[in-house]
């Protein structure tokens, strides 16, 4: 049995509910229903079961009048929801049984759901995991974001080159949301600020309407459900009737189209932001709508805005919603007659800011003239905020400088707490980007190491391992993940290790079938599945992985009778469309893969696989099937990583650097159980000071030199021999991410991995040990930390054991 609790509905009743929806919601009878019809009916039948817990949670929240959390995020990378909702309601087996009884295949219906890809990568997926944990912990919370019409682009390979096409998830009805046509707020842009009777008055020029769509987010065992409220942009009047009556239909619909562009598409840049006006408008659009909504709710319950910080905790997911500071000050000053200093301190009492990167190109800055044109009132308010900050802390750090508005500094100054996302990252935040502000406001920077929801990232995506864990330590672990430590006592039990291996084998076979069906690619499930899946970025060093792959290829060819450990190197990930080097790296992986995979000399020993269009659903298939997790970023660059946690939890040991949360994962699993290599963050900084460090590293490594020469000379691009000359020259001349310096250490450590993997039993023990020891990385732990250290909010779920007492 895999469901710990009794499902709320029998398979028979649930099948009846599905049929009812097929009839009344889809207008079909069973013989004529398409896969889409079945999927919608199943989704709606599941959604019905969420509504009661959702109402109940909302009712109790209003009654309790306690503090609520508002999580403002430009991105929510949700993925599919059928399995997620079914699992949280213990309805997964019932749903499957009900569909079978209707002649349908549950897995097929589940796979028909498009991914809700309203995010780029880690930051957006973290927001989705946090929503799951907030509900599981029973913390009254709202997620606020944008209902993008087009999520993250779809990736195709055309002769190995990434090509992007629009993602269209909303072309079909989205089963999970409830439209709230009555929840509308005007969002104002542009115009000018006039001084009227000593008061600054904003006369905006443009209005766009933010309209709400709510998705219930149900937690574990349906005990609690919060709301994810996403805003869609609409014109403030439907169309220009005058033009319409004149017969100028195109002109009549122009303002409508313009307004709607604001929620049209997700910007596909992860850590490389660009100062585009539309992006600024998106940020202000959803932030202003969210603040107007929470202030209205607070006032409608009779609140006095002076006490807003006692009732409202607003978390800014990076600087994208940092305009919340000046916007809340504006609402308090311009609409509710607060004095400047009261407005600022009240706003600061509500706001906290999470930093997700140290990469300078990702720290948002807006040209001041653009900013002042789009948000003239906020431009003035930021000057007031800066003046108040100078008075408080001295004039060391400016918010507006060199004709730019610096959103990181703004968010920092307007937040009562600022947090990093791993222990190392939070220390580096104090030492680097915000060193001066840290001096000025000691104690403001805190750490909350990221986490992942174990419901999606183990329970739902890995049934064989879930069942083994249930059989071994019982079923209390999904919302108390440290219970996995109970597996430690079984690590030396051969029967347990056999079953762990069998679970991994099942997952590897499933991945093999998936690759065959989807891409026609055959892989050997007995080989080591070595996986690197994440956005393509120079700092994440997919290029180093590829160089190691080529070096290994050379080595096998030189020594064909060696005792090689067969490997399948699996890559997955998208590059930002404008990121030229990242796209070259993708092409090189595909080009090199084609040559290596076609080489009879290494067949069965080395294979490169790069499935198109990596997304959340693909991760759910790949991660449970992984033998080796690649976490090889340049130390000091990956703020945390969260994929690293998902792999370890699913029994994949890590090869990695001392970066981000890798450090804490290694602490949990034990240094002897982690394949560490490479320079530390401090050594990286020192090495960059040495002249010609890359050239020296290449000269010292004949193995690396040979690989670079092969790539440069066109071994993998015979029809276009110079294709990668620029990429290789880049490594010689400005290898900012130290691929060359860490290469030998990485290669050597991979050979240690080869040897370790060859001993199947001890490798499986290592894999199981990973699962047993990384329960700390549950996002329930992370959210409990935010609740206690930053938000000062409490769980609404009374439990006898006090397990879920988060504050
Ligand atoms: C993102 O996914 C991350 C950082 C960003 O900085 C932007 C995006 Cl879209 C602005 C990632 C980090 O790179 C990763 O290390 C971290 O685990 C993740 O955010 C969640 O904190």
Image (cartoon, helix red, strand yellow):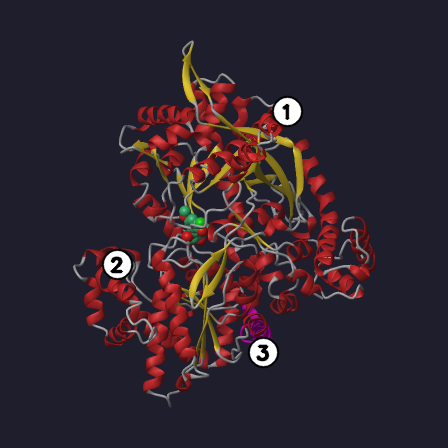
The residue that label 1 is drawn on is: 300
Dot 3 crowding, Cα within 10 Å, few <14, some 14–19, many 20+: some
Residue numbers of the magenta segment: 488-513
Front residue of 751 and 763: 751
Q: Is residue 525 visible?
A: yes
Left or right of 443, for residue 138 = right
Spatial separation of the CA atoms under disc 1 and disc 2: 56 Å
Identified at 33% across, 44% down, the residue is 430
Front residue of 81 and 627: 81
Q: Is residue 395 above or below residue 93?
A: above
| Residue 498 tag number | 3
Q: Residue furthest left?
A: 691
In primary-sequence order, the first of circles 1 and 2 is 1
In primary-sequence order, the first of circles 3 and 2 is 3
Dot 1 crowding, Cα within 10 Å, few <14, some 14–19, many 20+: few
The residue that label 2 is drawn on is: 683
SS for dot 2? helix
Spatial separation of the CA atoms under disc 3 and disc 1: 60 Å
Question: Is ligand 1 closer than 8 angstroms to the Cβ of mark 3?
Answer: no
Left or right of 113, for residue 546 = left
Question: Is ligand 1 closer than 8 angstroms to the Cβ of mark 2?
Answer: no
- Quarter of the figure with residue 675: bottom left
CB atoms of marks 1 and 2 within 8 Å: no
Q: Position of residue 286 (x, y in %)?
A: 52, 36
């Amino acid at each position: 049995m895999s469901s710990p609790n009794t499902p709320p509905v029998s398979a028979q009743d649930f099948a009846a509910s599905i049929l009812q929806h097929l009839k009344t919601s889809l207008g079909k009878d069973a013989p004529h229903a398409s896969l889409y019809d079945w999927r919608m009916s199943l989704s709606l039948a599941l959604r019905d079961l969420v509504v009661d817990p959702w109402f109940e949670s909302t009712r109790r929240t209003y009654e309790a009048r306690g503090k609520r959390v508002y999580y403002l995020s430009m991105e929510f990378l949700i993925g599919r929801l059928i399995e997620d909702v079914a699992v949280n309601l213990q309805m997964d087996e019932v749903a499957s049984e009900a569909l079978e009884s209707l002649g349908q295949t549950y897995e097929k219906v589940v796979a028909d759901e498009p991914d809700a890809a309203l995010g780029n990568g880690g930051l957006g997926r973290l927001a989705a995991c946090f929503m799951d944990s907030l509900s599981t912990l029973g913390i009254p919370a709202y997620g606020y974001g944008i209902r993008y019409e087009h999520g993250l682009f779809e990736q195709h390979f055309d002769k190995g080159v990434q090509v992007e096409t629009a993602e269209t998830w909303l072309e079909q009805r989205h089963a999970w949301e409830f439209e709230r046509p009555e929840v509308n707020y005007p969002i104002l842009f542009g115009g000018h600020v006039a001084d009227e009777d000593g008061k600054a008055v904003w006369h905006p020029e443009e209005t766009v309407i933010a309209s709400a769509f709510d998705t219930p987010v149900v937690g574990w065992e349906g005990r609690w459900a919060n709301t994810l409220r996403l805003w869609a942009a609409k014109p403030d009047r439907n169309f220009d009737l005058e033009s319409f009556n004149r017969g100028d239909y195109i002109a009549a619909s122009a303002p409508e189209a313009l307004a709607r562009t604001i929620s049209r598409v997700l910007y596909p840049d992860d850590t490389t932001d660009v100062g585009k006006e539309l992006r600024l408008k998106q940020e202000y659009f959803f932030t202003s709508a969210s603040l107007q909504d929470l202030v209205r709710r607070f006032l409608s319950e009779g609140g006095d805005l002076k006490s807003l910080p006692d009732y409202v905790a607003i978390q800014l997911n990076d600087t994208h919603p940092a305009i919340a500071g000046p916007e809340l000050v504006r609402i308090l000053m311009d609409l509710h007659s607060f004095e400047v200093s009261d407005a600022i301190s009240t706003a600061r009492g509500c706001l906290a800011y999470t930093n997700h990167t140290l990469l300078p190109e990702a720290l948002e800055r807006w040209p001041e003239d653009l900013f002042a044109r789009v948000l003239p009132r906020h431009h003035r308010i930021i000057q007031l905020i800066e003046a108040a900050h100078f008075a408080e802390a001295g004039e060391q750090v400016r918010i507006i400088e060199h004709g730019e508005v610096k959103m990181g500094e703004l968010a920092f100054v307007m937040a009562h707490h600022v947090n990093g996302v791993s222990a190392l990252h939070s220390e580096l935040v104090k030492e680097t980007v915000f060193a001066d502000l840290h001096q000025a406001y000691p104690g403001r920077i805190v750490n909350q190491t990221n986490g992942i929801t174990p419901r999606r990232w183990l329970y739902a995506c890995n049934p064989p391992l879930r069942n083994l864990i249930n059989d071994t330590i019982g079923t209390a672990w999904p919302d108390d993940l440290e219970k996995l430590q109970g597996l430690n006592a079984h690590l030396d039990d051969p029967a347990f290790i056999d079953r762990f291996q069998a679970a991994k084998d099942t997952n590897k076979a499933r991945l093999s079938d998936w690759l065959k069906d989807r891409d026609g690619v055959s892989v050997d499930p007995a080989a080591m599945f070595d996986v690197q899946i994440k956005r393509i970025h120079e700092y994440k060093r997919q290029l180093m992985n590829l160089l190691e792959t080529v070096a290994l290829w050379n080595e096998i060819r030189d020594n064909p009778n060696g005792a090689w450990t067969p490997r399948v190197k699996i890559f997955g990930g998208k590059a930002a469309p404008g990121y030229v080097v990242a796209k070259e790296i993708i092409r090189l992986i595909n080009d090199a893969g084609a040559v290596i995979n076609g080489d009879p000399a290494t067949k069965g020993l080395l294979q490169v696989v790069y499935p198109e269009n990596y997304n959340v659903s693909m991760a759910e298939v790949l991660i449970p099937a992984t033998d080796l997790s690649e976490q090889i970023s340049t130390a000091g660059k990956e703020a945390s990583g969260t994929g690293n946690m998902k792999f370890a939890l699913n029994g994949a040991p890590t090869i990695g650097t001392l970066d981000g949360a890798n450090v804490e994962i290694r602490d949990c699993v034990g240094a002897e159980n982690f394949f560490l290599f490479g320079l530390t963050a401090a050594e990286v900084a020192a090495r960059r000071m040495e002249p010609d460090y890359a050239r020296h590293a290449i000269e010292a490594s004949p193995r690396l030199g040979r690989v670079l020469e092969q790539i440069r000379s066109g071994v993998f691009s015979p029809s276009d021999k110079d294709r990668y000359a620029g990429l290789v020259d880049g490594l010689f001349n400005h290898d900012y991410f130290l691929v060359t310096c860490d290469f030998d250490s990485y290669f050597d450590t991979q050979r240690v991995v080869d040897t370790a993997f060859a001993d199947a039993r001890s490798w499986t023990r290592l894999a199981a040990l990973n699962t047993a020891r990384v329960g700390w990385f549950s996002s329930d732990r992370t959210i409990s930390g935010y609740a206690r250290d930053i938000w000062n909010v409490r769980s609404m779920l009374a439990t006898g054991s006090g397990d879920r007492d988060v504050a």
